[in-house]
Image (tube, rainbow, N blue to C red):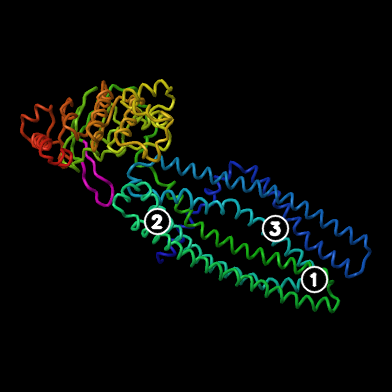
Amino acid sequence: MSDEPKKRLINLKQLEWGRLFRYVRPYRVRLALGLFCLMLSSGIGLLLPLSIGWLVNTVSTKASADLLNTVALALIVVFVLQMVFNYVQGYLITFVGERAVADLRIEIYTHLQKLSLAFFNERRVGELTSRVTNDVTVIQGVTTNAVAAFIQNIINFVGSFALMLSMSWRLTSVTLLLIPLLIVLGIFFGRKLRKLSTEVSDRLAEATSVLEETISGVRIVQSFAREPYEVERFSTAIEAAFSISMVRTRTRAQFIPIVSFSGFGALVLVLWFGGRQVLNGSMQLGDLVSFLLYAGVIAGSLGTFTGLYSQLQEALGATARVFGILDTAPDIADKPGVPELPNIVGAVTFDDVSFAYTDATNAVILSTINIEVKPGEILALVGPSGSGKTTLVNLIPRFYDVTSGAISIDGYDIRDVQLRSLRSQIGIVPQETLLFSGTIGDNIRYGNLTASAEEVLAAANAANAHEFISRFEEGYDTIVGERGVKLSGGQRQRVAIARALLKNPRILILDEATSAMDSESEGLVQEALERLMQNRTTFVIAHRLSTIKNATRIAVIDGGRLVELGTHAELLTRGGMYARLYNLQFDAMTSEAPALAEY
């Protein structure tokens, strides 16, 4: 079997109708009522051609005016009833569709929140955004609108066919010549449209990724004057999507007139054959008019069926991608039945800890790390860039799991406790602080969503943030902009420290929290950090000399291994790697040599 048939089978399997309609099931009462009104509306619609035939027969036979008035009035009643049922079914089915799509988007987002960092390291933000927005919108048409259209056209097709058969089996046989042709056309064009729609979605995902990257990194783009380059990159992605979209449009444009020509050609044949029956008196004119209208209904239903098939083909790729995300199991998850981590004092033990990425490189980052950190101790991590310092601290909140060995807190293996209870007792202040696009107060309160205004104020004071916050006209209600763009680096860092203070963690991780700051900002941030570190077990990825000297102990990591461990004075006395790095930084204070963390 070739790769293409295999891929098609996989996509068809991934559609999983039962799973897809699980999102509709909670609203099945509304859906059932909507479909019931749809059936009534369709049934009433089947009376229209028959009523028109009666009207024509009434006129052509020169019946009484009273009979004509009765038939016309009956037609108006039929139209009104159909209008009412159409409104009810349209509203209810649309509600179910929109609600199901909203639930699906929420489930995808909720699942994304559970996935580990490894998942996001391998995927672009724009791609995931496209899955939650564009692909789910494509699926919406299949879950409700397509079902409603399918049921409506089944009723129209079966009802029209039965009524046509009762009028003239010969004319009905002629009409049926249209069906095989439309089925073949639907399958042929449907497959082409599915492939093209998948390509369009992929190109739009690429364009969305470029958009996300350049907007979030607009400062870098403008600082390098690369606006023309990024416009060209985005335009190329959009033009690629446009080109494929136009191929899809041409395919659809070819499909519709071919189907229309086939349908109208068949109607002309029916009109010619039926006209001969009217002329020879074997059929009334009104019955022929009704028959033609029913034939038009059948032709429209068949055209809709082929369109639905094409829509289904287009949805296959979107469904596979969305369910592909939902089927991705989190790398980091709670074991069944594990307990919560109780309130800790903060004793952390690394026992023969090794770590390697489980990607194509299988690169070993850490090897047999053994460290015991006492409660309240400040452990500084130093070493050359890329030596594994950040990876080591990322193992503590289980952003990644150790490849071998174990990390325990207060004697509890962190893999044997609930993840949320573990992370709720760990605070992190990273080098590049991310603030959310709300107010300053909202960002501080992110550390404790139930904190009072007084608690937020106290945390801001302790973080040396209250003074600059008070200078803003809106104070704590000042909007920080996306990613905190309206604040300086030092201000963002102090807000992050206030956020960590409000969380009140027992274990604190500082990842080069004072790097790339001016002296004044660094002093304020360092003072705030010292308050934050009080009575907490703290891991500091060292960048500044003052932080290293204040540490209880210093661990030197090189090539993923622990090469030295001791106090500042002890390591200087040994004259090893730490002493060399320290002397380099000491020289940098006077000769502008590179900073410690760059070695």
Q: Which residues are magenta?
A: 353-365
Q: Nearer the viewer, mark 1 or mark 2?
A: 2
* Label 2 or label 3, whichever comes before in sequence order: 3
On the image, which quarter does residue 459 sit in? top left
Q: Quadrant of the C terminus?
A: top left
Residue type marked 3: Ile
Q: Which residue is mark 3?
A: 155
Question: Relative to 599, does residue 531 appear above or below in the rendering?
Answer: above
Examine the structure image and report whether residue 578 is included in the region drawn in magenta. Answer: no
Residue 411 position within the rendered picture, expressed as x and y whole percent measured from the top left: 27, 25
The amino acid on which the numbered mark 2 sits, given as a three-letter code, is Glu
- Image vertical order of residue 591 relative to residue 125, above or below: above
Q: Quadrant of the N terminus?
A: bottom left
Q: What x and y, as percent, mark residue 223?
A: 30, 49
Local SS, label 3: helix
| Badge nearest the viewer, 1 or 3 | 1
Distance between the alpha carbons at the discs numbered 2 and 3: 42 Å
On residue 206, which mark appears? 2
Find the distance from the CA under tag 1 to the CA under tag 3: 21 Å
The disc placed on residue 288 is 1
In-image side of 157 versus 491 (left or right): right
